[in-house]
Amino acid sequence: MDLLLERPSESGWVLDPLLAHSCAGGFVGYSASSLHLLVWSLGKLHYSPPAAWLETFLKATETHFFRFTPTELANIIWALAKLGAQLPSQWLDKLLLVAQWRFPSFPARLLSIVAWSTATLNHRPQPEWLMCFEEQVRAKFLDFSGHELACVAWSLRRFGYSTRDNAVFYMLQKQQNFLAADFEILSNPKLLRQVLGWKAAARGEGADAEGGWGLSGDGNTGGGNSLQ
């Protein structure tokens, strides 16, 4: 994959036959980890698969929902968001429900990635999911970096929350002492805009036009069993 990343324009002749081969058998024999690595690699390569391949992949993945680790769940939804995939709402809600049941084992970083990815896919989670997610943000607030908090704030605003109703803004207002995350946000105009919902005056763009995990080229996620 590293070689393909160096030559993205040449990826097709390698990936197309591999994708066709994997899809031909309906991904029979693929483990949950293999399915995760497959779509994660496509996300890293910015290589969108054919619609027929994606449809078959989603069906195969659904049977493994409860076998994915929190990192794999986050990586899968991140990759699909990076690829701009058009996902059935029912499929995505099922994936998010599995993540919700396992929220206690999600570290802050994975929570921010799941929120950013869901918002990037223009999907508004179910009310119960949003309530549980907000509870996790409050409970793990001190574990978030400034960048991750900005991602969460941006995502919640995309879900329909106003700035003042946003859990991130509420927790920042509530704390009594400045933390490292506060200084990270205050020293970065882009992160500050995402938290406060300000418009980027110099470029005339709304803060909702960009999200944190999509700003860098590699998406900040990693393969295997841990995020890089």
Image: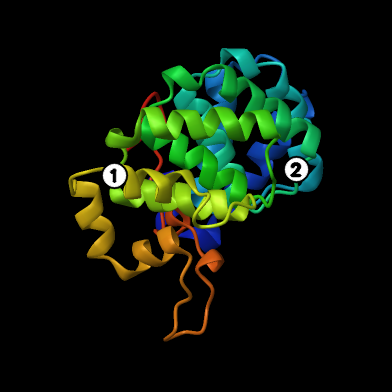
Whole-angstrom CA distance, mark 2 to mark 1, is: 29 Å
Rendered location of residue 160, percent (x, y): 64, 53
Viewer can see residue 224:
yes
Disc on res. 145: 1
Left or right of 185 on screen, residue 210: right
Does residue 2 sit above or below 100 in this rendering? below
Does residue 204 sit above or below 77 in this rendering? below
Rendered location of residue 170, percent (x, y): 41, 46
2 or 1: mark nearer the eye: 1
Of callouts 2 and 1, which one flags the residue occurring earlier in the amino acid sequence? 2
Does residue 165 sit above or below 64 in this rendering? below
Query: Hey, what amino acid is under mark 1?
Result: Ser
Q: Residue at x 77, y 23 (%)?
A: 25
* Secondary element at image label 2: loop
Mark 1 residue crowding within 10 angstroms, few (<14) / some (14–19) / many (20+) = some
Rendered location of residue 190, percent (x, y): 36, 67
Pick the front one: 172 or 97: 172
Mark 2 residue crowding within 10 angstroms, few (<14) / some (14–19) / many (20+) = some
Left or right of 49 on screen, residue 205: left
Q: Residue at x 52, y 47 (%)?
A: 116
Left or right of 107 on screen, residue 74: right
Q: What residue would you read off at disc 2?
A: 87
Quadrant (top left/top right/bottom left/bottom right) for the N terminus: top left
Q: Residue at x 19, y 46 (%)?
A: 179
Q: Residue at x 68, y 42 (%)?
A: 17
Viewer can see residue 42:
no
Does residue 113 sit above or below 63 in this rendering? below
Query: Hey, what amino acid is under mark 2?
Result: Leu
* Secondary element at image label 1: loop
Pick the front one: 168 or 184: 168
